[in-house]
Amino acid sequence: MEQYRSEILFEKHCPTIYALTKKAKIDWKGLDYDFEANHLKLGIATEANIVGLLLHAESGEQFPIYFLRYCEFLAKNLQKISKEKRKFREILIGKITNFKDLNYLNPIGELAVLKKLTDYGYELIRIEDKICFPSAKPKDFLFRTPQNKEILIEVVNIHIKDDFQTLNNLKIFLFGKMKEKIEKETVGIDLSEANDKLFFQPVLWHVDLIKFKEFKDFFKEFSSTFGKSFELNYNILGFCTFGTIDKKDFIFGELSTFYDRYNI
């Protein structure tokens, strides 16, 4: 049976994710066409989606290789804990193979949060929960905490595109993004109902950890108060991000802890 370029690259660089696609009917020919039409012909940077990263990895570039290795690590480990395997597979495959969506990083952020919380003893109950707040948009994850309390987690992916010269400018940007997301996600939800149930988890992308070191006290204070000291009404967990160890191994965690744990 003929294999198409995107299928060959997935099988080579992301065998676990590729194995998941075997249980879904993926139109590889169509995906190749979409990639050509939406990236190469329109002049969009090829690294703007995961197939572009696969192409860069195939050429030997180190960052795409390490990042795809991390995606594999997530997929392999999360299969073990997800009770809703079919739903998990549909979400993973649907988002990663949607080449028209330039925010391909967002599902990786969601999966990284899922892995982090399960490592801390949180039990995944449901993905894309619609039951807790039926009049609102579904939330990413419903967990049972180690204290046997059910909580909802909504991941907020924030892409850093500017070089912030002051803490005030950074806060304006981050809080603006958070409030925009919160407004969308809390339509149909009463604040008093959500206070102990709904938590937002911001994930920052493209963070320069060396430059952000001067803001570390802000991130620590934010984390310790769930954002309440900055007059954000809903519960917001500490900002998480990605980093590298020895310029190759990907790590994910709370930004406020990076500077104490790692030599940055």
Image (cartoon, rainbow, N blue to C red):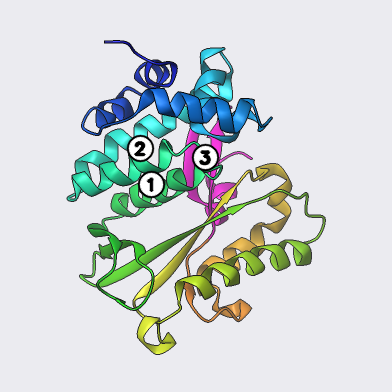
Give 209 or 107, whichever is nearer the viewer.
Answer: 107
Q: Which residue is mark 1?
A: 111
Residue 49 image offset from top left, x and y in percent: 53, 34
Residue in the foreground of this view, choosing between 61 and 26:
26
Q: Residue at x 70, y 66 (%)?
A: 171
Residue that appears at 65% across and 44% down:
209
Q: Position of residue 213 (x, y in %)?
A: 69, 50
Residue situated in front as seen by the camera: 56 or 255? 56
Residue 154 against residue 87 in the figure, above or below: below
Disc ID at residue 74: 2
Disc assigned to residue 151:
none
Asked whether the residues under the numbered discs 2 and 1 touch, taking CB atoms below 8 Å apart as contact, a structural biologist would say yes
Q: CA distance from mark 2 to mark 3?
A: 23 Å
Please tell me how crowded label 1 is: few (under 14), some (14-19), or many (20+) other residues with Cα within 10 Å: some
The magenta region covers 239-264
Q: Is residue 246 visible?
A: no
According to the picture, the residue beneath numbered tag 3 turns out to be 100
Q: How many numbered tags mark residues here?
A: 3
Residue 173 percent across, percent down from the top left: 70, 63
Quarter of the image with the C terminus is: top right
Q: What is the secondary structure assignment of the residue under circle 1?
A: helix
